[in-house]
Amino acid sequence: MLETPDGRIIKESFVILRYLDEAIDGPALRRSDPVEHAIEFMLITREGPFTMAGYLFVMNQDRDRRDACADKLLYVYRDINDFLIEHNPDGRYLFEDFGLAEAVFAPIFMRFWFLEYYEGFQLPDTPEYHRVRAWMQACLSHEVTGQITREEIVKLYYDYALGVGNGALVEGRSVSSFTLPPIGETDRGPLETNIAITQATKLSGSSPELSCSVS
Ligand SMILES: N[C@@H](CCC(=O)N[C@@H](CS)C(=O)NCC(=O)O)C(=O)O
């Protein structure tokens, strides 16, 4: 949610992004050419299925569904790969520089560090993912991604890995791991212990009893 200087409220991350692109001085992220703008929009439409697949994957608590979750995500990665090959096979970004599509996907690529951590997920190193991997790496190495670390993301999304999203409370807890700013140093001890237990549980399936002692 964003409140404008005159007190009006704008909701939805993509609407906010487009508002900022128009409201902030300087070169726009969006393409000015109508056809190129349509092309970047076609890529942006993949963000919904991509995000959904990744969140369902990290929130999944059923080991028997893990491979199906990974397959759904990989399907979207391949779809994005093919799209990028069609429109810019040899480049790093969709066009020549970081633009609107990259501003949409870069935060999701960063969030999906939670999949590496909790699910041991890695994009396969096979040709069908090479173009999307190059794009993802270009997005992740851009300076705008320096605002939050992998560790902060893993800790923020700890409750998602327990199947509880968007700030809802895990039973027995009075603070969500999704509380911003990240839980302070004094709370880190039990949180880190539990994050490690959750990671081990999701990766190996052999779990000690989960204890959610973050208060
Ligand atoms: N559609 C809204 C919110 C979407 C939403 O709630 N997304 C879920 C994931 S599909 C969520 O957990 N959002 C919090 C986050 O991603 O950090 C927006 O994009 O502003």
Image (spheres, rainbow, N blue to C red):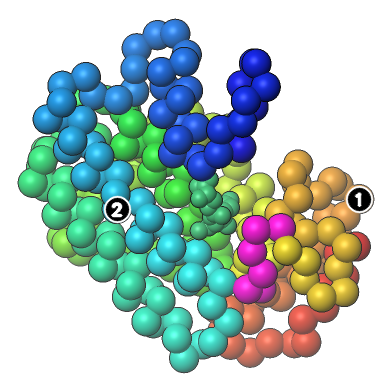
Can the viewer see residue 200?
yes
Report the magenta stretch's main SS: loop
- Seen at 69% across and 65% down, the residue is 159
Which quadrant holds the C terminus? bottom right
User: In the picture, residue 103 is in which quadrant?
Assistant: top left
* SS for dot 2: loop
- Horizontally, residue 3 falls left or right of residue 182, namely left
**Residue type, label 1:** Thr
Q: Where residue 114 sits in the image (x, y, percent)?
A: 55, 60
Q: Where residue 70 sits in the image (x, y, percent)?
A: 38, 74
User: In the picture, residue 37 is in which quadrant?
Assistant: top left
- Horizontally, residue 127 falls left or right of residue 166, namely left
Query: Does the magenta-highlighted stretch encompass residue 166?
Result: yes
Give above or below for 19 relative to 195.
above
Q: Which mark is residue 46?
A: 2
**Residue type, label 2:** Arg
The magenta stretch spans which residues?
162-167
Q: Looking at the image, which is closer to me, 142 or 157? A: 157
First in sequence, mark 2 or 1: give its number: 2
Q: Which residue is mark 1?
A: 186
How many numbered dots are placed on residues in this image?
Answer: 2
Query: Does the magenta-highlighted stretch encompass residue 51?
Result: no
Give above or below for 214 relative to 184.
below
- Seen at 43% across and 49% down, the residue is 109
Q: Where residue 72 sits in the image (x, y, percent)?
A: 33, 72
